[in-house]
């Protein structure tokens, strides 16, 4: 009886252990564990920038002036109107110009007739000279007359071309597509050669002008990298021009950055920020896709050594391609979740820790 009492508790203990193993296995299967892809926040070399104010300018901006004298017959566009390149914008009366063109054409016809006559005379003189019936002097006179008549034709042709151009000048055309900014004449006014008529600028080709202090001109010249900061993001210029001299009053150097064609919500006369690369610095970087942005909260899901996941608020800097600089809230070497949506789901299952 005594031996029987000792064996029974041992069997119960074995059954109890088996039950615990089975139950634990069942509980482990019931707990949902979502896979989380992670990465380590680490220091990386990134460009060091200095930001300055710049002014947006139109590359194509000009004032159209009269190239012939006359009276303004029509003004087709006004301030703020958009004009296509080559479109007539002002028309002058062309009575005098048209009359001058007709006169030049008549003089050309006369010169052509005289040249034909001189050519025929030279042909006869040449034939007679070869036959020995006229003197060398008469032959030379015929040749000179022919040459002079041909020169008169060329002069008359040039006069016709000039007269026709004067007629063309009575119709003033836009040199490029753009916006009219000023109008200086009205219909009925008499204008002279060189008088301003209309000003305009093109919105298609823009540039930004920046004044840089002489203290940082050396790194700016060395790096020759910059970006224009707009509401739509960073715009890389197509070319950067550094003026080789400084302003004697402000001791600053002018830098021009030509922008690619496109709509960047920039207009001539606006101020904008320009970031110039002046070197490199170590920065704490994380993938931009790992950052969670909710209203005023910006954070990342930090994965602890015990596999707990907690949302931690951070302060971010600028973006560098697919990475973003972290200014505060995270230390180098900490592990974060790459997919914040999956990390949030993982927390809601109850298997993760609380928020920091």
Image (cartoon, rainbow, N blue to C red):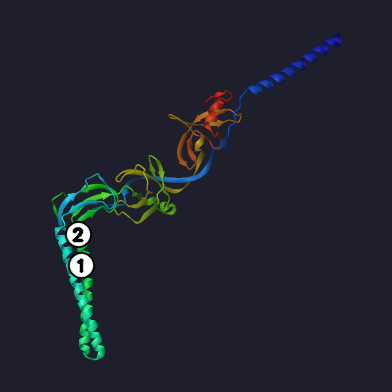
Viewed as shown, does residue 295 lie left or right of 352?
Answer: left
Residue at the top extreme, as displayed: 1
Q: Is residue 184 visible?
A: no
When asked about the image quadrant of residue 152, the answer is bottom left
Along the viewing direction, whichever of 185 and 98 lies nearer the viewer? 98
What residue appears at the point 19 percent right and 75 percent down from the top-left corner? 114
Residue 107, above or below 29: below
The label shown at residue 186 is: none
When asked about the image quadrant of residue 248, the answer is bottom left
Q: Position of residue 133 (x, y in %)?
A: 22, 91
Other residues around mark 2 within 10 Å, as few (<14) / some (14–19) / many (≥20): many
Q: Position of residue 46 (x, y in %)?
A: 49, 45
The residue singled out by tag 1 in the image is 159
Q: Position of residue 63 (x, y in %)?
A: 23, 53
Q: Secondary structure at mark 2?
A: helix
Q: Position of residue 175 (x, y in %)?
A: 27, 54
Viewed as shown, does residue 51 lie left or right of 347?
Answer: left
Q: Secondary structure at mark 1?
A: helix
Viewed as shown, does residue 353 lie left or right of 276?
Answer: right
When asked about the image quadrant of residue 273, the answer is top left
Along the viewing direction, whichever of 130 and 351 lies nearer the viewer? 130
Other residues around mark 1 within 10 Å, as few (<14) / some (14–19) / many (≥20): some
Label pair 2/1, CB-CB below 8 angstroms:
no
What residue appears at the point 43 percent right and 49 percent down from the top-left corner? 278
Q: CA distance from mark 2 to mark 1?
A: 13 Å
Q: Is residue 5 visible?
A: yes
- N-terminal of the pair, mark 2 or mark 1, is 1
The residue singled out by tag 2 in the image is 167
């Amino acid at each position: 009886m005594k031996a029987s009492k000792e064996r029974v508790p041992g069997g119960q203990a074995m059954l109890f252990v088996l039950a615990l193993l089975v139950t634990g296995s069942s509980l482990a299967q019931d707990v949902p564990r979502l896979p989380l892809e992670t990465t380590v926040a680490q220091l990386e070399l990134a460009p060091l920038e200095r930001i300055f104010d710049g002014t947006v300018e139109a590359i194509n901006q000009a004032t159209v002036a009269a190239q012939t004298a006359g009276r303004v017959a029509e003004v087709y566009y006004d301030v703020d109107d958009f004009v296509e390149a080559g479109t007539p914008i002002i028309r002058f009366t062309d009575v005098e110009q048209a009359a001058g063109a007709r006169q030049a054409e008549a003089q050309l016809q006369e010169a052509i007739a005289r040249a034909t006559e001189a050519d025929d005379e030279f042909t006869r003189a040449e034939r007679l000279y070869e036959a020995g019936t006229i003197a060398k002097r008469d032959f030379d006179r015929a040749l000179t007359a022919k040459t002079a008549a041909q020169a008169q034709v060329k002069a008359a042709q040039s006069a016709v071309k000039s007269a026709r151009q004067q007629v063309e000048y009575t119709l003033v055309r836009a040199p490029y597509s753009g916006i009219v900014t000023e109008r200086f004449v009205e219909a009925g006014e008499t204008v002279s050669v060189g008088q301003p008529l209309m000003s305009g600028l093109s919105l298609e080709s823009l540039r930004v002008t920046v004044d840089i202090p002489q203290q940082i001109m050396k790194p700016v010249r060395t790096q020759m990298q910059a970006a224009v900061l707009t509401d739509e993001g960073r715009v890389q210029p197509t070319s950067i021009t550094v003026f080789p001299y400084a302003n004697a009053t402000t001791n600053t150097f002018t830098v021009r950055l030509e922008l690619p064609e496109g709509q960047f919500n920039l207009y001539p006369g606006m101020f904008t920020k320009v970031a110039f690369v002046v070197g490199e610095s170590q920065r704490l970087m994380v993938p931009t896709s790992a950052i969670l942005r909710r209203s005023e909260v910006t954070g990342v899901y930090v994965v602890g050594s015990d596999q707990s996941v907690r949302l931690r608020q951070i302060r971010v800097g600028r973006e560098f391609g697919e990475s973003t600089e972290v200014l505060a809230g995270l230390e180098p070497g900490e592990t974060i979740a790459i997919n914040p949506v999956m990390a949030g789901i993982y927390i809601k299952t109850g298997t993760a820790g609380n928020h920091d």
